[in-house]
Image: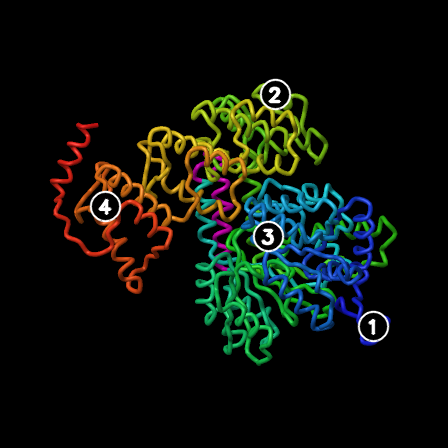
C-alpha cells in the first residue's frame, strides 16, 4: 500500500492517508516544530517521506510554504505521484526553489523571497544543504525567516565524505522527530526484502594496487606470506563466472525494468557498450534508456522507460539524477556498476529498488570494481541485526517481519581470500608501531591523517584511531600499559579525535600563513604533506557562518590573519588599486582591457562593479566608497561618449572651434578626429548608424561649435599641432 488519499468530509474532497510509520513521524514532527521551531525526519529512500511534507501542507492550506530541493526534477516527480491520486491537492501557497537557485540570489532577492512570510520551510534532502556552494545561501534565507518553522527530510543526515558532518545538528540543533535506517525499514517490512547478489568486474586494477602494496613491504618474510595470499586471490578471480553468466542466472524477469547506476558519462558509455555480450543470455531483445543531468533528452527517456510495457528487457542507465527523491513503479531491480562510493549514495541507489507497499522481491546486483566493495552489504546487514535486537529489547518483536535477506556471493571464495590478504597486510602491533615511530622521526609528531597509508602499504592513520578507541573503551581490544607508554614516547595524542583534527588543521594553516603572509588559500590546495588545507579553511568558514565555531577558535584564527569572506578581501584589494589609479589620474575612466603593472585586471574589475550596481549586488558602503573615487555608473556607451565629449571640449577651449582634422589625435592619445566624424555621420544618417545621438548630446555639441555639415577644414594636423604649441607657450 502506498501513502494514498482517502475521502475527507465534504463532496469530492480527498485527504492524504499515510503509512503508519509516516503517520507517527508526522505527528512527532508537528509537536517538535511547535516546541522548538524545527524538526528533522531521517527515513530511508522509498519510505514515502515526501508525503509527510504534503500532509503538512494539506493541514495548513492557508499558510505560505517554501519548499527547497536539490532539483526541479525531484519535486516534479513527487508532484506527479501526488496528483495521480489527488489532482486538486492545495498547492497555491507552496513556493518551490532549488538550492542552486538560492545560491544565485542576491541579498535583495533573498529578502524578496523571505517577504512572502512563510509559515513553514521544507528542506528536502537536507543533507545537500551542507554543500559549500549551497549552504551559505540556504542559511542566509533561514536567518531572514526567523518565524518560519523548519521541516527537514533526508535518508541520511551525515555527510560521510565531508568529515562526517551531521546536518541534523547543524541545521536542526539535533531535533530529529523520527529516525529510521534502511536496515530497520527492511526488518519491519516497510520496504520489501531484496535478493542481493554481489560480484566483481575489472578486478585487474585492484589486483595491481595490492601487488604494489605487497612489493613495497620492507620485511621479506611478511612480503612472501602476502604474495601467497594475493596469488591465491588472483587464481580464484580468474576461475569465477563472468558477468554474462551471472546476469543470465539471476535476472529471472526477462521483460523487467532495471535501473543501472554508473559513475560518470564515460563509465556509462563503457557499460552500455557491453550490453549485447552481458545481457544476451537474459533476453536478446534489450532496450537501453539513458538518463543523466546534462542530457536534454533525459525527460523523454525517463518517461518512455516508465511507460514501456513491452516484452523487452528494459535497462535505464543513469549517473546521478535518480540517486535522490525519484521513484519508478514496477522496478524489478537495480544493477550497481560502481567504484567505491559514499554510504549515502550506496543506500540511495539500493533504495531505487525498494518502495514501501511493494510485495515483490526486488533484485539488487552489486557489481563492484574493487574488493572493498564486496563487503558494503555487511553495513546494511549490521543495521538489520541492530534493529532486531532493539525491537526485541523494547518489546516490539511482533513488528519484525524478517531478520535477514538472501545474499548470494558469486565470488564468496574471492572475498574470503581478500579478507585474509587484508588481515595479513594489516597484522602486527609491533609492525605498525615501527611505522608510527618512523613517521614521528620524519615529522616530529604523530598527527597522522586518518586515511594515511605508509609507503609499505599499512593504514597507519586508521590504526592510530583504533588505538585511541580501544583505550577509551569504545571498541574491544587489548592495549597494555606498556604499549600506551611506548606510544606516549613518540608523541601519541589521546584526546578527542575532532579536537585533534581541528588542531592539526590550525597548525597547517599557521604554517601556511608564516610562509605566505596570508590565509587566502585556494579551495583545492593541499600542503606538501598531503593535508587538504583548502577544504579545511572552507569547512571552518562554514562553521562560523552557522554559528558552530567556538569563540576561542575564531580568536586563534583571527590572530593568524584568517579571511572569513574571500569576496570581501578580494574586493578590498581591487578597491585599493582603483583608488590609487584615481589619485594618479583624477578619474576612473579605465579601459576594460587595462591591467596594472602587477598583473591585476583592474579594468575588468571596474566594469564588474558597474554591472553589479544596478543589480543590487553592491552594499551601500561599497557604492559610497566608489563614488568618492569618481566611479561612473552609466552604461559603457555613455561612458565612452562622455570621454569623447570631454576631449572635444578641451579642443574647443584651446582653439575656439571644433574644426577637428579627421586624423587628429589628442596629446593624451585619443583619436578625436575620428570621434567627431562619427558624431556627424550619426546625425546625418540615423537610419544607417547603430549609435544614438540624443537631443541632449546634440545641444552639448552645438555649445562647443560643432559643425554638422561635411567640411574640409583648412587647418591640417601639423597646423593644429603648431597652434597647440603656440597656445602652450602663450600660457
Q: Is residue 183 left or right of residue 426?
A: right
Q: CA distance from mark 4 to mark 3?
A: 58 Å
Please give the residue where the numbered disc 3 appears in the rendered image: 99
Magenta segment includes 234: yes
Give the residue displayed 35% in from the left and 32% down from the top: 586
Question: What label does residue 658 carry, if any?
Answer: 4
Query: Residue 214: horizontal and vertical position, in percent?
Result: 46, 40
Disc 4 crowd, CA 10 A, few/some/many (<14, 14-19, 20+): many
Question: In this rendering, which labeled residue sits more in front, label 1 or label 2?
Answer: 1
Residue depth check, mark 2 versus mark 3: number of the one nearer the observer: 3
**Residue located beneath label 1 in the image:** 7
Q: Quadrant of the N terminus?
A: bottom right
Quote the CA–CA distance across marks 2 and 3: 47 Å
Instruction: Tell me the CA gap for discs 1 and 4.
Output: 85 Å
For label 2, the residue is 488
Circle on res. 573: none
Instruction: Indicate the secondary structure of the residue bearing disc 2.
Output: helix
Asked if the magenta segment contains residue 528, the reply would be no
Residue range corresponding to the magenta coloring:
215-239
Q: Position of residue 664 (x, y in %)?
A: 18, 44
Image point 27% across, 62% down: which residue? 685
Q: Is residue 718 left or right of residue 71?
A: left
Q: Nearer the viewer, mark 4 or mark 2?
A: 4
- Residue 159 to residue 329: above or below: above
> What residue is shown at x 46% (from left), y 31% (from top)?
529
Q: 435 or 399: which is nearer to us?
A: 399
Q: Residue at x 58, y 69 (%)?
A: 258
Of callouts 1 and 3, the N-terminal one: 1
Mark 1 crowd level (few <14, some 14–19, many ≥20, 10 Å Cα): few
Asked which secondary structure carries label 3, the reply is helix
Q: Mark 4 vs mark 3: which is more N-terminal?
A: 3
Question: Which badge, 1 or 2, is on the more N-terminal residue?
Answer: 1
Amino acid at each position: 500500500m502506498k501513502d494514498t488519499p482517502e475521502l475527507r468530509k465534504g463532496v469530492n474532497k480527498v485527504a492524504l492517508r499515510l503509512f503508519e510509520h509516516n503517520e507517527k513521524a508526522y505527528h512527532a514532527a508537528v509537536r517538535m516544530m511547535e516546541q522548538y521551531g524545527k524538526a528533522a525526519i531521517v527515513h530511508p529512500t522509498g519510505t514515502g517521506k515526501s508525503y509527510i511534507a504534503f500532509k503538512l501542507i494539506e493541514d495548513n492550506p492557508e499558510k505560505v510554504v517554501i519548499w527547497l530541493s536539490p532539483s526541479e526534477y525531484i519535486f516534479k516527480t513527487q508532484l506527479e505521484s501526488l496528483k495521480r491520486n489527488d489532482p486538486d491537492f492545495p498547492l497555491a501557497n507552496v513556493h518551490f526553489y532549488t538550492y542552486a537557485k538560492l545560491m544565485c540570489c542576491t541579498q535583495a532577492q533573498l529578502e524578496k523571497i523571505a517577504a512572502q512570510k512563510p509559515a513553514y520551510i521544507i528542506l528536502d534532502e537536507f543533507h545537500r544543504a551542507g554543500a559549500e556552494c549551497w549552504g551559505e545561501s540556504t542559511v542566509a534565507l533561514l536567518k531572514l525567516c526567523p518565524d518560519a518553522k523548519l521541516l527537514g527530510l533526508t535518508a541520511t543526515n551525515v555527510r560521510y565524505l565531508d568529515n562526517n558532518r551531521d546536518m541534523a545538528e547543524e541545521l536542526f540543533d539535533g531535533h530529529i522527530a523520527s529516525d529510521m535506517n534502511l536496515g530497520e525499514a527492511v526488518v519491519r517490512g516497510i520496504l520489501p526484502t531484496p535478493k542481493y547478489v554481489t560480484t566483481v568486474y575489472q578486478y585487474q586494477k585492484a589486483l595491481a594496487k595490492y601487488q604494489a602494496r605487497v612489493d613495497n613491504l620492507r620485511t621479506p618474510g611478511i612480503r612472501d606470506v602476502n604474495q601467497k595470499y594475493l596469488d591465491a586471490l588472483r587464481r580464484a578471480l580468474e576461475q569465477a563466472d563472468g558477468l554474462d553468466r551471472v546476469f543470465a542466472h539471476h535476472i529471472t524477469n526477462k521483460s523487467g525494468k532495471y535501473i543501472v547506476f554508473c559513475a560518470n558519462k564515460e563509465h556509462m558509455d563503457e557499460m552500455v557498450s557491453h550490453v549485447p555480450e552481458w545481457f544476451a543470455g537474459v533476453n536478446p531483445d534489450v532496450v537501453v534508456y539513458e538518463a543523466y543531468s546534462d542530457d536534454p533528452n533525459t525527460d523523454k527517456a525517463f518517461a518512455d522507460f516508465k511507460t514501456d510495457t513491452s516484452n523487452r528487457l528494459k535497462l535505464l542507465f543513469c549517473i546521478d539524477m535518480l540517486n535522490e527523491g525519484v521513484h519508478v513503479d514496477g522496478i524489478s531491480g537495480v544493477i550497481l556498476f560502481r567504484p567505491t562510493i559514499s554510504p549515502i549514495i550506496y543506500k540511495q541507489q539500493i533504495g531505487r529498488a525498494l518502495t514501501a507497499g511493494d510485495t515483490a522481491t526486488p533484485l539488487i546486483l552489486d557489481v563492484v570494481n574493487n574488493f572493498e566493495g564486496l563487503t558494503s552489504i555487511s553495513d546494511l546487514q549490521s543495521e538489520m541485526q541492530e534493529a532486531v535486537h532493539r525491537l526485541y529489547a523494547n518489546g516490539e518483536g511482533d513488528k519484525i517481519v524478517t531478520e535477514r535477506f538472501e545474499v548470494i556471493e558469486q565470488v564468496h571464495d574471492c572475498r574470503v581470500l581478500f579478507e585474509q590478504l587484508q588481515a595479513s597486510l594489516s597484522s602486527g602491533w609491533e609492525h605498525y608501531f615501527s611505522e608510527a615511530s618512523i613517521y614521528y622521526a620524519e615529522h616530529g609528531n604523530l598527527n597522522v591523517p586518518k586515511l594515511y597509508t605508509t609507503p609499505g602499504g599499512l593504514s597507519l592513520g586508521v590504526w592510530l584511531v583504533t588505538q585511541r578507541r580501544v583505550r577509551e573503551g569504545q571498541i574491544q581490544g587489548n592495549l597494555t600499559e606498556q604499549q600506551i607508554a611506548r606510544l606516549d614516547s613518540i608523541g601519541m595524542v589521546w584526546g578527542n579525535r575532532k579536537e585533534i583534527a581541528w588542531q592539526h588543521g590550525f597548525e597547517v594553516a599557521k604554517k601556511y600563513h608564516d610562509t605566505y603572509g596570508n590565509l587566502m588559500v585556494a579551495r583545492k590546495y593541499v600542503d606538501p604533506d598531503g593535508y587538504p588545507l583548502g577544504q579545511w579553511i572552507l569547512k571552518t568558514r562554514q562553521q562560523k557562518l552557522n554559528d558552530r565555531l567556538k569563540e576561542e577558535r575564531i580568536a586563534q584564527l583571527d590572530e593568524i590573519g584568517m579571511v572569513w569572506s574571500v569576496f570581501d578581501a578580494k574586493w578590498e584589494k581591487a578597491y585599493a588599486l582603483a583608488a590609487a589609479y584615481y589619485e594618479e589620474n583624477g578619474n576612473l575612466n579605465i579601459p576594460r582591457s587595462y591591467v596594472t603593472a602587477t598583473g591585476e585586471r583592474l579594468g575588468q574589475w571596474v566594469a564588474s562593479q558597474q554591472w553589479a550596481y544596478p543589480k543590487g549586488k553592491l552594499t551601500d558602503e561599497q557604492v559610497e566608497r566608489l563614488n568618492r573615487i569618481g566611479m561612473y555608473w552609466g552604461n559603457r556607451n555613455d561612458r565612452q561618449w562622455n570621454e569623447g565629449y570631454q576631449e572635444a571640449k578641451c579642443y574647443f577651449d584651446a582653439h575656439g572651434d571644433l574644426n577637428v582634422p579627421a586624423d587628429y589625435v589628442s596629446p593624451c592619445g585619443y583619436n578625436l578626429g575620428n570621434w567627431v566624424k562619427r558624431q556627424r555621420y550619426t546625425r546625418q544618417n540615423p537610419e544607417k548608424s547603430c549609435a544614438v545621438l540624443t537631443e541632449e548630446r546634440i545641444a552639448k555639441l552645438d555649445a562647443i561649435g560643432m559643425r554638422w555639415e561635411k567640411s574640409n577644414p583648412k587647418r591640417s594636423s601639423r597646423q593644429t599641432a603648431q597652434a597647440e604649441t603656440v597656445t602652450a607657450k602663450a600660457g
